[in-house]
Image (cartoon, rainbow, N blue to C red):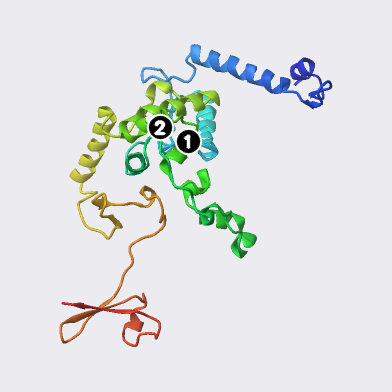
């Protein structure tokens, strides 16, 4: 603190221009970079199996998904493991803290497919139609917002929380700071795997994350080593009869011809399969009610629909 005060003055105010000086910030960033370079050159956070240590400690987090840049929520989660690994290292343990990038699942493909459709429909760069005045209106803060702002925010989709009301994938990419010349490359799903992980690593190195970056990897069969690791897990669990093939009700995407899990969807998070009761009438017809209460099938409410399907 003494060094900072002497270097920048106690007030931090530029008297000539009447604006806040950045000298303190610049000084602290310089200190930060100095020691980050020392950590890297001395390989402080690299851990090998041959290291002699009475105790070992392994830390990891759920791999962040690589359909965008990291945000403050990722930082909140990552620092929990980092604090623990730093503490265990101070206790003399051989600590391994790797980092990985999640690229499996449908979100990346869905984004790439949507971008391909937009360029085919509206051109490249696309010339989108003007959004309606309704879509430009700010979100109304209803009584729910006044009661519990946090709960109200949870009702909004992830994309809307990040990028506002942007409904086009091209606009979402622009919102990430990606240039119009580079956006078309994201129509290829493999480009997401080569673009976002290096940016993720750069951001985390900038905050001084105590990870062993030699251990970094991505998921999917693009990485045959991790892919074989996952297959070994499933084969081992199946051999021990811990898992098995079966059936369950799932939300299905006819467009992609496969189940569509919660975070794979552009909208509809939290929506799951609903159970309906069908009545097989004696004369060979099924009646399906849109009321989820079984007792109402006997004496339906006046407002509930009833649909007749021939058997």
Image point (42%, 20%), residue name: 47
| Residue 220 position by quadrant | top left
Query: Which residue lies most toward the right here?
Result: 15
Query: Is 97 on the left or on the right of 307, as rendered?
Result: right
Image point (42%, 40%), residue name: 127
In the displayed structure, would residue 117 be above or below residue 17?
below
Query: Is 220 on the left or on the right of 164, as rendered?
Result: left
In the displayed structure, would residue 267 be above or below residue 239?
below
Q: First in sequence: mark 2 or mark 1?
A: 1
**In the image, residue 135 lies at what x, y percent?**
51, 54
The disc placed on residue 183 is 2
Image point (40%, 50%), residue name: 266
* Mark 2 surroundings within 10 Å by alpha-carbon count, few (fewer than 14), some (14 through 19), many (20 or more): some
* Mark 1 surroundings within 10 Å by alpha-carbon count, few (fewer than 14), some (14 through 19), many (20 or more): some
**In the image, residue 24 lies at what x, y percent?**
72, 21
Asked whether residue 77 appears in the rendered view, the answer is yes
| Badge 2 vs badge 1, beta-carbon distance below 8 Å | yes
């Amino acid at each position: 603190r003494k060094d900072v005060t002497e270097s920048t003055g106690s007030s931090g105010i530029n008297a000539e221009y009447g604006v806040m000086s950045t000298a303190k910030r610049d000084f602290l960033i310089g200190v930060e970079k100095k020691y980050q370079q020392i950590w890297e050159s001395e390989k402080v956070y690299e851990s090998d199996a041959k290291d002699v240590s009475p105790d070992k400690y392994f830390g990891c987090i759920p791999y962040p998904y690589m359909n965008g840049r990291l945000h403050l929520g990722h930082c909140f989660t990552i620092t929990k493991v980092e604090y623990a690994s730093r503490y265990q290292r101070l206790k003399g343990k051989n600590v391994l803290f790797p980092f990985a990038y999640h690229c499996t699942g449908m979100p990346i493909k869905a984004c790439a497919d949507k971008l391909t459709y937009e360029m085919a429909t509206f051109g490249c760069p696309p010339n989108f139609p003007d959004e309606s005045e309704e879509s430009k209106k700010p979100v109304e803060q209803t009584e729910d917002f006044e009661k519990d702002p946090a709960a109200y925010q949870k009702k909004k989709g992830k994309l809307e929380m990040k990028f506002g009301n942007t409904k086009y994938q091209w606009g979402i990419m622009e919102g990430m700071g990606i240039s119009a010349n580079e956006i078309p490359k994201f129509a290829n799903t493999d480009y997401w795997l080569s673009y976002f992980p290096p940016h993720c690593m750069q951001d985390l190195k900038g905050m001084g994350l105590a990870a062993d970056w030699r251990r970094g990897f991505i998921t999917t069969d693009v990485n045959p080593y991790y892919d074989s690791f996952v297959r070994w897990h499933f084969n081992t669990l199946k051999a021990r009869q811990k898992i098995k093939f079966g059936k369950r009700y799932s939300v299905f995407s006819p467009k992609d011809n496969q189940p569509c899990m919660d975070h794979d969807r552009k909208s509809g998070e939290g929506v799951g399969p609903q159970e309906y009761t069908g009545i097989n009438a004696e004369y060979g017809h099924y009646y399906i009610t849109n009321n989820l209460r079984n007792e109402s099938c006997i004496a339906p409410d006046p407002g509930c629909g009833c649909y007749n399907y021939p058997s």
